[in-house]
Image (cartoon, rainbow, N blue to C red):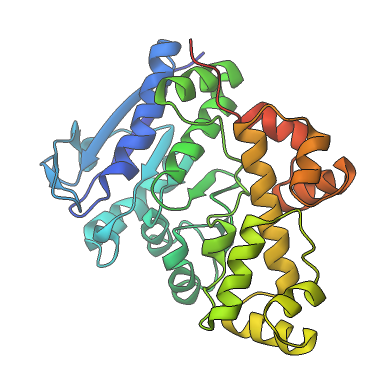
C-alpha cells in the first residue's frame, strides 16, 4: 500500500485542536499500520505560528517547498476571518493538485475563498454557515451535519468534528479495525455519523422567553416517553393548543413536534451508546413505543438503523 502524505496548512490564529485532533488520528493510524501515512505541517515561510489560544506551533517546513500531498488539510480558527491572502493564493494554486481536500471548522472559508468549493456540498462550524453561504453562493452549505463528503472534498464542523472526519477517512483508507484502534487509543467513539446534527436537541432550539414554555421544554427533555402531544403540552403550559403551538415555534424556532422528535432521538442515541438495554426496551423508554418506529426515526434522522448505530458508536470496553 502506497504511503499517503498528509499536509496540514498552518497560519497565525489557527485553532490548535483543529490541527492536533486530525494529526493525532493520522499519526495513530501510522503507528498501527507503519508506512501508510506521512504527516507534515507547513506554514507560508516555514516559521512558527501562534494559535488562537496562544500556543506556538513549529511546522515541519514551508508551503512553498512542500510537494503535492495526497491529503491537504486546512484547519480553522480566528486566522480565517481575515486570512493572509498569500495563503489563499497558495491554496488556489496547489489545492487542485491534492487527491483529497479536507477542512476542519472554518478552514472551509479558506477553501471557498480559493475557489475550491464551487458546486460542492459542504459544512463548517454552525456559527459561520450563514456567512459562508452568503459570501459564496456557488457553494451548497449544509449547517446540520458534523462532516460532509463530496467527491474529493471533505469538510467538517467545529473543532472535535475534525476528529470524527479524520477517523472516517482512516476507516476509508485502512479499514474499520485500524480506525477502531485509533479511536480506542484516543478514547473517542468510532465514529459519529457524518450526518449527525451539530447540536443537541436543547441547543438546536432556542430557549423560550416565557417561563411556562421553558418549563415545557425541560419537561419534554426529562420525560421523552410521556404524553408529548400538543394538547398535553399545551395543558401543561396553561394555553390553548393553537396558542401553544404558535408561541412555542415563535420562541424556540421550531415546532413542538420537531422538538419532541429531536429529544426522543437524542435520548435513544444516548441509551444505545451508554447502556446495554435492548432495542425494544430503549424504544419504549424513548417514547417510540415500538422498535420499528424507532428504526424509522433513526434512518430518517441519522441514516443508520439503531442496531448499526450501537455497533459503530458505542465505546469499546476497556482492556
x, y percent for residue 159: 38, 48
Please give the name of the residue rendered at 48% of the width and 67% of the height, measured from the top-left corner: 129
Q: In the visual, does 251 lie left or right of 5?
A: right
Residue toward you, 201 or 68:
201
Image height check: is 279 above or below 53? Answer: above
x, y percent for residue 16: 26, 44
Asked whether residue 242 is in view, the answer is yes
Residue toward you, 210 or 184:
210
- Tell me the quarter of the picture where residue 186 sits: top left
Residue toward you, 291 or 175:
291
Image height check: is 54 above or below 201? Answer: above
Total labels: the figure holds 0
- Tell me the quarter of the picture where residue 171 sits: top right
Please give the name of the residue rendered at 38% of the width and 60% of the height, measured from the top-left corner: 114
x, y percent for residue 182: 46, 21
Please give the name of the residue rendered at 73% of the width and 90% of the height, measured from the top-left corner: 243
Please give the name of the residue rendered at 65% of the width and 86% of the height, measured from the top-left corner: 247
x, y percent for residue 84: 21, 61
Image height check: is 21 above or below 95? Answer: above
Q: In the visual, does 225 lie left or right of 16?
A: right
Image height check: is 21 above or below 126? Answer: above
- Tell me the quarter of the picture where residue 235 sits: bottom right
Asked whether residue 99 is in view, the answer is no
Amino acid at each position: 500500500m502506497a504511503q499517503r502524505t498528509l499536509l496540514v496548512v498552518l497560519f497565525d490564529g489557527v485553532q490548535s485542536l483543529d490541527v492536533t485532533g486530525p494529526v493525532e488520528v493520522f499519526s495513530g493510524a501510522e503507528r498501527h499500520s507503519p508506512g501508510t501515512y506521512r504527516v507534515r505541517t507547513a506554514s507560508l515561510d516555514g516559521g512558527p505560528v501562534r494559535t488562537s489560544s496562544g500556543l506556538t506551533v513549529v511546522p515541519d517546513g514551508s508551503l512553498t517547498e512542500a510537494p503535492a500531498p495526497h491529503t491537504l488539510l486546512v484547519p480553522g480558527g480566528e486566522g480565517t476571518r481575515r486570512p493572509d491572502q498569500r495563503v489563499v493564493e497558495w491554496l488556489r494554486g496547489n489545492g487542485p493538485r491534492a487527491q483529497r481536500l479536507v477542512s476542519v471548522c472554518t478552514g472551509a472559508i479558506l477553501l471557498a475563498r480559493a475557489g475550491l468549493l464551487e458546486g460542492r456540498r459542504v459544512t463548517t462550524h454552525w456559527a459561520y454557515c450563514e456567512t459562508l453561504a452568503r459570501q459564496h453562493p456557488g457553494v451548497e452549505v449544509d449547517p446540520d451535519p458534523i462532516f460532509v463528503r463530496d467527491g474529493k472534498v471533505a469538510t467538517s464542523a467545529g473543532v472535535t468534528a475534525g476528529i470524527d472526519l479524520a477517523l472516517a477517512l482512516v476507516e476509508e483508507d485502512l479499514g474499520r479495525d485500524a480506525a477502531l484502534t485509533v479511536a480506542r487509543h484516543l478514547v473517542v467513539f468510532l465514529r459519529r455519523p457524518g450526518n449527525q446534527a451539530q447540536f443537541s436537541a436543547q441547543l438546536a432550539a432556542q430557549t423560550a422567553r416565557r417561563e411556562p414554555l421553558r418549563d415545557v421544554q425541560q419537561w419534554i427533555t426529562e420525560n421523552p416517553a410521556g404524553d408529548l402531544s400538543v394538547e398535553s403540552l399545551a395543558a401543561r403550559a396553561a394555553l390553548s393548543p393553537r396558542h401553544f403551538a404558535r408561541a412555542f415555534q415563535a420562541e424556540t424556532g421550531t415546532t413542538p413536534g420537531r422538538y419532541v422528535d429531536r429529544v426522543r432521538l437524542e435520548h435513544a442515541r444516548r441509551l444505545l451508546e451508554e447502556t446495554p438495554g435492548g432495542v425494544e426496551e430503549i424504544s419504549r423508554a424513548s417514547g417510540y413505543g415500538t422498535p420499528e418506529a424507532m428504526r424509522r426515526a433513526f434512518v430518517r434522522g441519522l441514516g443508520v438503523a439503531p442496531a448499526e448505530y450501537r455497533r459503530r458508536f458505542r465505546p469499546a470496553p476497556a482492556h
